[in-house]
Image: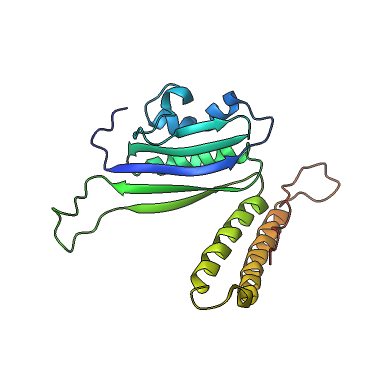
Amino acid sequence: MSRYNAPFEIHVHGDVPLRADVTYAQLQDALKPLWAYAGAKSLADGAESSYEEEPGIKFDATEHVLRMCWTVPGEEDFRQSLDEMCMSLNELAERGAAIEVTFYDAEFDEEEESPEAESRDDFVMMFVGPTPAAIMQVQRDLLVEDVVNLMERHFDGAELGGVVAEIDKLFSQRFDELVNSLEIGKPPRGTGGAGHGGGRRPRHLH
């Protein structure tokens, strides 16, 4: 599909560790929402970025990692493609990973716009992982990194243990609430039904 006049340039960036048994065919199927959105007929056809200097979408078969540094022209409906891709990648991921998505307003010209005009640039952080715990672990680690980097301007890193502990408490509470919500929908023991497990609790790194 042609998107020469698309209102956004959308950049997808991130590395996703994959299970060792994941094949190229499985990855191509999981990434179909992206390459199909770009109007391609296959992953190989759609893996190139709009910008030559960007590596695009690469499958590192040696390291079992999906590497993405890929730009495509698009609209707001690209968000649905992202959701579909993340759902598929959850089943292939070895560990949790973050995917950064930036929407650049292609129609905004800072030099020509009035001073009060604002661009529609947007930034979205997506998360994938084999379990809810793996996803929460990545979210927790990124938050700790951001908070520590911010607070180290004013405090020594050794003073921030209490702050990290409070962040861990928040994520433990969220994880417990998730597990409890899944337990509610689990069939009673002995009925032969298979419930959804909550996975491992996220690690607390101090």
Quadrant of image for the C terminus: bottom right
In the image, residue 140 sits, relative to residue 7, either above or below, namely below
Q: Is residue 6 left or right of residue 181?
A: left
Query: Residue 60 at what x, y percent from top left?
Result: 57, 32
Residue at 54 percent of width and 42 percent of height? 15
From the top left corner, tell me how far across and down residue 117 is, in percent: 19, 59
Q: From the image, which quarter does the N terminus lie in?
A: top left
Determine the residue positioned at 36% across, 36% down. 72
Front-most of 137 and 186? Answer: 137
Q: Position of residue 190 (x, y in %)?
A: 86, 46
In this rendering, does residue 148 appear at all? yes
Does residue 102 appear to the left or right of 133 in the view shown? left
Q: Nearer the viewer, residue 21 or 172?
A: 21
Q: How many marks?
A: 0
Q: Is residue 88 visible?
A: no
Residue 136's quadrant in the figure? Answer: bottom right
Q: Position of residue 6 (x, y in %)?
A: 27, 38
The chosen color scheme is rainbow
In the rendered image, which quarter is residue 69 located in? top left
Q: Measuring 82% from the left and 41% from the top, which residue is drawn there?
A: 192
The image shows residue 98, relative to residue 39, as above or below, that is below
Determine whether 84 is above or below 203 in the image. above
Q: Nearer the viewer, residue 61 or 115?
A: 61
Query: Which residue is found at the position 49% from the left and 70% from the top?
Result: 150
Q: Between 39 and 144, which is closer to the camera in this rendering?
A: 144
Judge from the rendering whether residue 129 lies leftward or rightward of residue 196; answer left or right: left
